[in-house]
Image (cartoon, grey):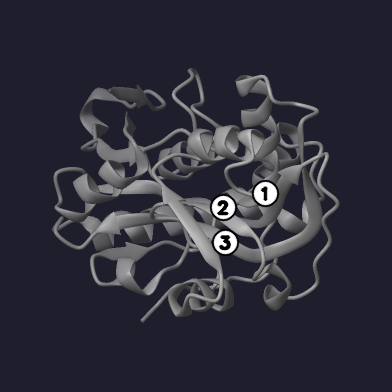
Amino acid sequence: MACALALPLQADEAAPTIRLTNGHWPPYMENTPPHYGVISQIVTLAFAKKDIPVSYGFFPWSRARLLAEKGRWDGSVAWTCRKKLLKHFHFSDPIVAHNYALFHRTSMDFDWEDVKDLESYRIGLTQDYNYGEEFEEAVAAGTISADVTTSDESNFRKLAAGRIDLFPMEPAVGMGMLKELGLSGKITFHTAPLQSDYLYLILSKQVPESERYLEKFNEGLSELRASGRLEELITTSLPDLPARYLVVEDEVQCVE
């Protein structure tokens, strides 16, 4: 499903619409007008600074990535830096910082300090997510027991049912999803972050105009950040999270 979200342009200044895949990860990204989540809103406003309208298509995350990778859509919102994505995409400047925390049943006494502390637990993971180099190396080595599925909702249901012990998820997204699923109060999270990272706009290397779009987006994003509008959008939309997890103070580039 495609959703257009853009500011009006003068008829003689009309620019081609950039088409971006998107997914369900509220409050950051969601198929709910008028803004489609705070990161979608930031992306739209950054492009609007350069008179480029945006159209979003909402898909499951694996399909969202694949459609953009093949150039059927211009790019996708929003992804962490991963080596396998760098082969197919140009990465923007970072939009926001974020972190993953380990969710667990409230009835389970859980504490951890190091990835080695997680070796005795069954951990649910969502396909195509990036959980950090150290953790993913432990999964690849088989020292951590991982159960991979295609949706966050499925992992939360398995966690509530006791089929897994832990599930790493971004706190704001996770708490909102638990409320939607009717699981609030049954599941909580440990405050120590499993991973701290950044979210980026990615643009397909199959699209000839992608580098020009990337330059324009980065310029618009920089203007939003310099004006204070970016921080305002984030802290207003996500008032319950510490600002240090959300506002990028130093540019962190995702490059090969």
Can residue 58 be seen here? yes
2 vs 3, front mark: 3
Mark 2: which amino acid? Glu
At which x and y percent is residue 92? 42, 61
| Callout 3 secondary element | strand
Q: Are marks 1 and 2 in contact (CB under 8 Å)?
A: yes
Q: Residue at image x 66%, y 50%?
A: 165
Mark 1: which amino acid? Ser
Foreground residue among 118 and 171? 118
- Examine the rendered structure and indicate whether residue 227 appears above or below residue 244: above
| Callout 2 secondary element | helix
Q: Circle 3 is placed at which residue position?
A: 198
- Label 3 Cα neighbours within 10 Å, binned few <14 / some 14-19 / many ≥20: many
- Label 1 Cα neighbours within 10 Å, binned few <14 / some 14-19 / many ≥20: few
Q: Residue 227: which numbered mark, if any?
A: 1
Q: Circle 2 is placed at which residue position?
A: 223
| Callout 1 secondary element | helix
